[in-house]
Amino acid sequence: MAAMQTIRNIVILTGAGVSAESGIDTFRSAGGLWEEHRVEDVATPEGFARDPDLVLRFYDMRREAIQTKAPNPAHHALGRLEREWPKQVPGGTVTLVTQNVDDLHERGGSLSVIHMHGEHLTVWCTACDTRRRWTGPLIHRPPCPECETPALRPDVVWFGEVPYRMDEIIVALQEADLFVSIGTSGAVYPAAGFVRMARELGARTLELNLEHSQGSSWFDETCLGPASEIVPTWVDELLGR
Ligand code: BJW
């Protein structure tokens, strides 16, 4: 990896693999969510229009499940890195971008998380275009607390929709000295393209994953293993412990 002194700004992209050891299903691994649910049915606006009950039940089930799960050592290590890095490298930044819709990074101590694919614990009212925290089910079509229309949907980004906060992510990638991808298969764009973008903009690139991702050849370095082990080790190394 690049000498520590040359690293100032770090961008970290996480995917389902970082939460796997907390007991949250990944999408594409064996036994993952897409084995039992067709993507077209549950993760597209067309699927939602066709069969909203199916989609609302799918997300109600997952919203309920994540509230019974706890962050693992990988989440805690990334929270620690965000807090410690600016003390170690004055002016240095850690930007955590997650594709995950769970809240385990926040519960693991991360203060500022970019949820580019949305969040389980917020809902979006498509009538008045407001978003708010929501922990219960949606299947019974509760009215929006703001406008009272029963038009709440999961605040997640489905295929064909534009991921959130892309402008901020691009700026962070432009300023990054190190880009680290953790526990994502590299199957879904635009996130899968970040490594290439970061590299072309001059950042070092590191992959931490259980197995090689689809874009593995774009990384300068790959470290394979379970996130709960390799992420804390990497953070300790970076913080010089
Ligand atoms: C472990 C581990 C352990 C396991 N330790 N690791 C061609 C080029 C460019 C784009 C496209 C294209 N063709 C089509 C597109 C567009 C499309 C797309 O990418 N399609 C692909 C199928 C090709 N993308 C979109 O539509 C996106 N929007 C878009 O492009 O808008 C245009 C636009 C962009 C930018 C600016 C302006 C306009 C939207 C994508 C939305 C994705 N939504 C989902 C659902 C979110 C809600 C929900 O959770 O239900 O997001 S799909 C799903 O996949 C979810 C995830 O965030 C995402 C990525 O999955 P992830 O995290 O990588 O999980 P897995 O399961 O795939 O991998 C797990 C990994 O963990 C594996 O690598 C394991 O090895 C590892 N692992 N255990 C460490 N213990």
Image (cartoon, helix red, strand yellow):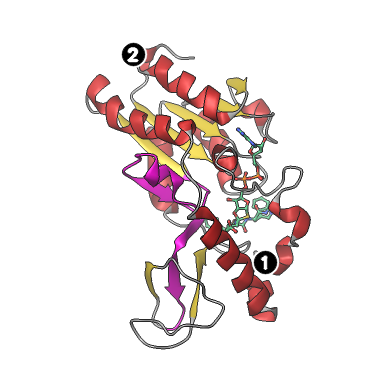
* Relative side of 141 to 112, left or right: right
Q: Is residue 63 magenta?
A: no
- Asked whether 195 or 29 is in front, the reply is 29
* Relative side of 92 to 125, left or right: left
- Asked whether 11 or 202 is in front, the reply is 11
- Asked whether 43 or 56 is in front, the reply is 56
Amino acid type of the residue that numbered disc 1 sits on in the rendered structure? Val
Amino acid type of the residue that numbered disc 2 sits on in the rendered structure? Gln
Q: Residues within 10 Å of mark 2 (few under 14, many from 20)?
A: few
Question: Residue at the location (70% across, 80% down)?
Answer: 50
Question: Residue at the location (46% across, 70% down)?
Answer: 136
- Looking at the rendering, the stretch of residues picked out in magenta corresponds to 98-127
Q: Is mark 2 within 8 Å of ligand 1?
A: no
Residue 49 seen from this side: yes
Q: Earlier in the sequence, mark 1 or mark 2?
A: 2
Which x, y percent locates residue 115? Answer: 45, 52
Image quadrant where one finds the C terminus: top left
Which x, y percent locates residue 28? Answer: 71, 46
Question: What is the tally of numbered marks visible in this picture?
Answer: 2
* Residue 159 falls in image quadrant: bottom right
Q: Is residue 8 above or below residue 11?
A: above
User: Which residue in the structure is indicated by mark 2?
Assistant: 5
Question: Residue at the location (45% across, 57% down)?
Answer: 164
Seen as rendered, the residue at the extreme front is: 68
* Relative side of 139 to 87, left or right: right
